[in-house]
Amino acid sequence: MTSHSSHSVTAVTLPHLFTPVEIAQALGCSEWWVKEQAKRRRIPFTRPGGAYRFTAEHFEEIVRLFEERPSRRPEGRGVAPARRTRSRREGDPPPARLVARPPRRSRQAHPLAA
């Protein structure tokens, strides 16, 4: 009987696959958030055996996807512009006034008051 030891298997370097827990710890977020983003196809992932897994390249791309760059504003303009509101035109009805309802507890305590 011949043994297989005479055949040498070349060492193949396989990429390390990170779990959602490991990615969440690295990003400082929850495992749920990582899985939810993958489920909604907002971040790259692989899914061998039905479980979300991430390569180092996936992690780098996730970081790039959520990176925010500073806006390029001229110096000295540190204040954000005021929010524009729509002015009322002639003939527009007045805005509706909102009136709070009494709390449910007080209505239950005094059934005749309602």
Image (cartoon, rainbow, N blue to C red):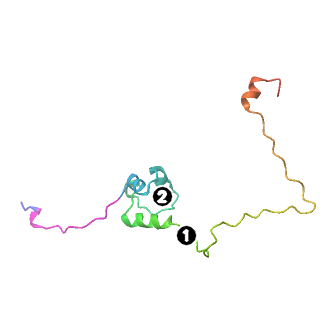
- The extreme bottom residue here reads 74
Residue 14 on the magenta span: yes
Q: Main secondary structure of the magenta part?
A: loop
Which residue lies under the disc numbered 2?
38
Which segment is the magenta one?
4-17
Q: Position of residue 99 (x, y in %)?
A: 81, 41
Q: Position of residue 95 (x, y in %)?
A: 85, 53
Q: Secondary structure at mark 2?
A: helix
Residue 85 on the magenta span: no
Q: Is residue 23 above or below residue 8?
A: above
Q: Quadrant of residue 63?
A: bottom left
Q: Residues within 10 Å of mark 1 (few under 14, many from 20)?
A: few
Which residue lies under the disc numbered 1?
70
Q: Quadrant of residue 3?
A: bottom left
The amino acid at mark 1 is Pro
Gap between marks 1 and 2, in whole Å?
27 Å
Q: Which residue does the image show at 73% across and 31% down from the upper left?
A: 104
Q: Nearer the viewer, residue 103 or 12?
A: 103
Q: Quadrant of the N terminus?
A: bottom left
Q: Nearer the viewer, residue 1 or 68?
A: 68
Left or right position of 87 against 52:
right
Q: Quadrant of the C terminus?
A: top right
Upstream in the sequence, badge 1 or badge 2?
A: 2
Which mark is in front, 1 or 2? 1
Q: Position of residue 49 (x, y in %)?
A: 37, 55
Q: Which residue does the image show at 25% across and 67% down from the upper left?
A: 13
Q: Secondary structure at mark 1?
A: loop
Q: Which residue does the image show at 46% across and 55% down from the upper left?
A: 34
The amino acid at mark 2 is Ala
- The extreme front residue here reads 76
